[in-house]
Image (cartoon, rainbow, N blue to C red):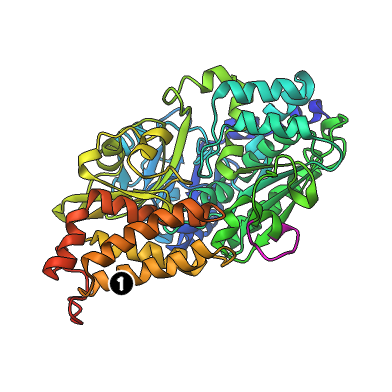
């Protein structure tokens, strides 16, 4: 397919959309499907046929609409009118919506106020297609401007121009460490030769995190387009998406999207009738948390046991099968098309001096609005939790927020004014991570929280290096003694020493950051540790003391 043919498809789809009197988008992400979203979508389709509205009403399954706790969600758009969002919908409610469309009278109940801070305080780039694009139709993505950035790249830009725009944007890797994306791309481009590879890290393993899963389920073509642009920039012809086997819906939609893109010559040989060739294959992970580390991920793709190796050499120089390899995560690639379309300088106007753009967070835990949000870098933590997140339910008090998953830290109420960016989080002992944000109230024991995450890291350690293999076991044992009220001051001192040792001497990022929950809770909630050790009391009433479990 050439660009003119693609433009014709795009225009045809836009015309069909403009002729419809209503578009009804049902959230078809895993969260809403688990509460009956698929049945709601089926009921809408059946009602459209029953009311003879097939020519004027379009029903689509779309990406995550954000308010995951209130699903299944339904978004109704009629002409130029403001969209209406309905929560907790059912098949019977879907029939009522369709029945009311001819007269323009929609149900008044179950409506969600789109002017509430949850929606107005967000800035959507990565998640901008939710409610607009059908997750399983490439035509919808094209109508919304999809693959325009790839067209422009191949028609107007040299590879070094693409790298320059990405560098100018200030985009940093959204998978955890925040390494400058443009610098990584330029390193791979300089090392590139025959057999350079592109990898998308979709091995999202943090407890409570579902950002990458939601993007893959709702907007897979956005990721494919970003990967294709990256491949052109660094001279790669083969790409892999390494996705967790626990994400069956994301895998299914990725397979569909790849087939559709290949059919329209947007992937494969001579893309858009150019000299650029690029193929993407999927590799399914078996759920090992350590495979989120890039060298362990590479080993897994190669068919080996997923274990990290020492660096250097870094994957940018010697990655898959010893060839230069560019590895970025889902959210990073999803930012690429907007950067190319609007320019790196425009993207850099968002965020803070050193942390540009937006960040997608999965809000979970003790918070009113559990769900998916996208906010500018640098938004204060308190605004995310209390304005967008709606605060703490049941009139309880905020106690801590954990960012960065098992590798992150716990942030107390004293730092609610903290701007959420890479440097500010690191400054208080936490990390951005992939974007999980777990909120806790006064019923959470911070010693028990540290023990929980240490148990996770202990179980997920690959065992290759002694500091991680043995250090996580020993730290978990000490934390368990504390939660049982049998620890001493010597145990506390040993815990602090082990946390430092494991951080400084482990081979990969899992071990190097495994102690972060321990170190941050020791720093910000030291009095709780002392209460467990000296008073044999859990202030939150959570831990078993002297063998008696209050739970």
For image coordinates 52% across by 40% down, the residue present is 174
Q: Please give left or right for residue 141 compared with residue 409 in the image.
A: right
Residue 445 at x, y percent in the picture: 23, 62
Q: Mark 1 points at which residue?
A: 480
Give, as a single range, the part of the protein colored magenta.
300-308
For image coordinates 55% across by 41% down, the residue present is 331
In this view, 46 is above or below 221:
below
Q: Please say whether residue 493 is visible from this viewpoint.
A: yes
The prevailing secondary structure element of the residues shown in magenta is loop
In this view, 316 is above or below 290:
above
Along the viewing direction, whichever of 109 and 251 lies nearer the viewer: 251
Q: Please give left or right for residue 307 compared with residue 384 in the image.
A: right
Residue 265 at x, y percent in the picture: 81, 39
Secondary structure at badge 1 equals: helix
For image coordinates 26% across by 49% down, the residue present is 523
Q: Please say whether residue 72 is visible from this viewpoint.
A: no
- As drawn, the residue found furthest toward the bottom would be 547
In this view, 289 is above or below 486:
above
Tell me the quarter of the image containing the N terminus: top right
Residue neighbourhood size for the residue with mark 1, other residues' Cα within 10 Å, grouped as few (<14), some (14–19), many (≥20):
many
The answer to if 266 sits in the magenta stretch is no
The answer to if 302 sits in the magenta stretch is yes
Count how many numbered circles sit on residues in the image.
1
Along the viewing direction, whichever of 139 and 390 lies nearer the viewer: 390
Residue 134 at x, y percent in the picture: 58, 45
In this view, 314 is above or below 11:
below
Residue 205 at x, y percent in the picture: 51, 58
Tell me the quarter of the image containing the C terminus: bottom left
Q: Please give left or right for residue 301 compared with residue 368 in the image.
A: right
Along the viewing direction, whichever of 238 and 113 lies nearer the viewer: 238
Q: In which quarter of the image is residue 138?
A: top right
């Amino acid at each position: 397919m050439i660009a003119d043919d693609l433009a014709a498809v795009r225009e045809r789809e836009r015309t069909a959309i403009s002729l419809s009197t209503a578009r009804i988008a049902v959230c078809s992400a895993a969260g809403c499907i688990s509460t009956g979203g698929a049945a709601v979508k089926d009921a809408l389709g059946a009602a459209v046929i029953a009311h003879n509205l097939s020519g004027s009403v379009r029903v689509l399954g779309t990406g995550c609409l954000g308010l995951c706790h209130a699903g299944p969600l339904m978004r109704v758009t009629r002409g130029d009118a403001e969209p209406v969002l309905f929560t907790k919908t059912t098949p019977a409610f879907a029939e009522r919506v369709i029945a009311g469309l001819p007269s323009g009278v929609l149900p008044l109940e179950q409506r969600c106020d789109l002017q509430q801070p949850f929606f107005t305080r967000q800035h959507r780039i990565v998640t901008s297609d939710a409610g607009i694009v059908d997750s399983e139709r490439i035509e919808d993505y094209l109508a919304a401007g999809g693959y325009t950035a790839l067209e422009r790249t191949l028609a107007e830009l040299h590879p070094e121009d693409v790298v320059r725009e990405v560098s100018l944007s200030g985009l940093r890797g959204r998978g955890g460490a925040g390494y400058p994306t443009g610098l990584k791309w330029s390193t791979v481009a300089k090392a590139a030769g025959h057999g350079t590879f592109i990898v998308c890290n979709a091995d999202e393993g943090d407890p409570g995190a579902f950002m990458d899963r939601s993007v893959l389920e709702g907007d897979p073509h956005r990721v494919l387009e970003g990967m294709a642009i990256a491949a052109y920039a660094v001279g790669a012809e083969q790409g892999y998406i390494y996705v967790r086997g626990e994400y069956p819906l994301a895998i299914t939609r990725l397979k569909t999207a790849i087939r559709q893109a290949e059919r329209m010559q947007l992937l494969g040989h001579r893309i858009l009738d150019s000299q650029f060739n690029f193929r993407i294959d999927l590799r399914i992970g078996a759920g090992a948390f350590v495979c989120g580390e890039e060298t362990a991920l590479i080993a897994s793709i190669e068919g080996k046991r997923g274990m990290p190796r020492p660096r250097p050499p870094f994957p940018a120089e010697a990655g898959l099968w010893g060839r230069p390899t560019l590895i970025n995560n889902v959210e990073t690639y999803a930012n690429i098309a907007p950067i190319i379309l609007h320019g790196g300088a425009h993207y850099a106007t968002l965020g803070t001096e050193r942390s540009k753009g937006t960040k997608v967070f999965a809000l979970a835990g003790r918070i009113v609005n559990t769900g998916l949000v996208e906010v500018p870098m640098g938004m204060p933590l308190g605004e995310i939790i209390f304005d967008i997140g709606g605060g703490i339910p049941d009139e309880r008090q905020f106690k801590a927020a954990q960012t960065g998953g098992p590798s992150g830290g716990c942030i107390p109420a004293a730092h609610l004014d903290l701007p959420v960016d890479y440097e500010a989080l690191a400054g208080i002992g936490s990390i951005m991570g992939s974007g999980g944000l777990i909120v806790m109230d006064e019923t959470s024991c911070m010693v028990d929280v540290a023990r929980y995450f240490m148990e996770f890291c202990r179980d997920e350690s690959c065992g290759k290096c002694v500091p991680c293999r043995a250090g996580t076991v020993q730290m978990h044992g000490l934390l368990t003694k504390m939660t049982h009220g049998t620890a001493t001051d010597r145990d506390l001192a040993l815990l602090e020493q082990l946390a430092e040792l494991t951080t400084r001497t482990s081979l990969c990022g899992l071990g190097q950051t495994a102690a972060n929950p321990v170190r941050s809770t020791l720093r910000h909630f030291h009095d709780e540790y002392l209460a467990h050790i000296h008073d044999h009391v859990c202030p939150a009433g959570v831990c078993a003391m002297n063998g008696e479990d209050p739970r």
